Amino acid sequence: YQCQIRDDRSQIIATMIRLKSIQGTIAIPKFMPGSYKIRNFVGSLQNIKAFDSKGPLALIQKDTNSWQLPDSDDFWIVANFFVGDLQVRDCYLDDKFGFINPICIMPQVIDYNGELSLKLYPLKKQHDWQIWCADSSCDWGQELIFNDYHHLYDSPIFMGSNLEVISNDIKIL
């Protein structure tokens, strides 16, 4: 996975997923463990596309939150999400602070249970932001490794120019 902040004013984050030799379905979860409630994460989706080195690929929507993966050996899925909705456990982004709950903007490849990596890319003006993810700090473009999708979605990401990390608690200054 790669997440790139497109524009903090329009509050869009692009999620890119590179898939090799994987067939099946990609889905945006309908629920979040621990909230015991159906969520509408797909409602934040602005668009989703697939492409390979030759150009666009067909991405067939199966239902409201899942798509059939294209028949290609090496391809990308790109999805743009609005992250300005201040609902519980959702994502948020402005010019001073960002919070990413991965389950909201990182579609799951169904039936893939292997290791995942994540890289975050900022806007130019955000290069001084601190990042806290998966119980540790990291830098922009640094690869974070997760055991599986469940580990990824249970690792919220905090970003900002005025973060103070005390133990595993984060204080926004």
Image (cartoon, rainbow, N blue to C red):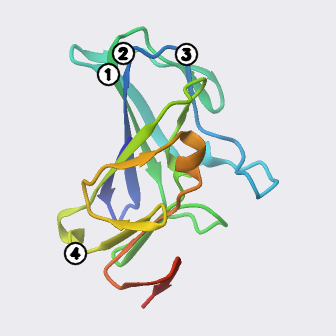
Tell me the mark number nearer the camera, choosing from 2 and 3. Answer: 3
Circle 3: residue type: Gly
Circle 4: residue type: Asp
Q: What kind of element bears circle 2?
A: strand
Which residue corresponds to mark 3? 24
Which residue corresponds to mark 2? 57
- Going from N to C along the chain, the mark reached first, 1 or 2, is 1
Does the CB distance between marks 2 and 4 fall below 8 Å? no
Q: Residue sitting at 45 percent across and 16 percent down? A: 22
Does the CB distance between marks 4 and 3 fall below 8 Å? no
Which residue corresponds to mark 1? 51
Which residue corresponds to mark 4? 128
Q: Residue sitting at 27 percent across and 63 percent down? A: 139
Q: Which quadrant of the figure has residue 78?
A: top left
Tell me the mark number nearer the camera, choosing from 2 and 4. Answer: 4
Residue 122 position within the rendered picture, expressed as x and y whole percent measured from the top left: 26, 60
Circle 1: residue type: Phe
| Vertical comparison of 87 with 56: above or below | below
Residue 10 position within the rendered picture, expressed as x and y whole percent measured from the top left: 38, 61
Q: CA distance from mark 4 to mark 3?
A: 39 Å
- Residue extending furthest top? 71
Does the CB distance between marks 3 and 1 fall below 8 Å? no
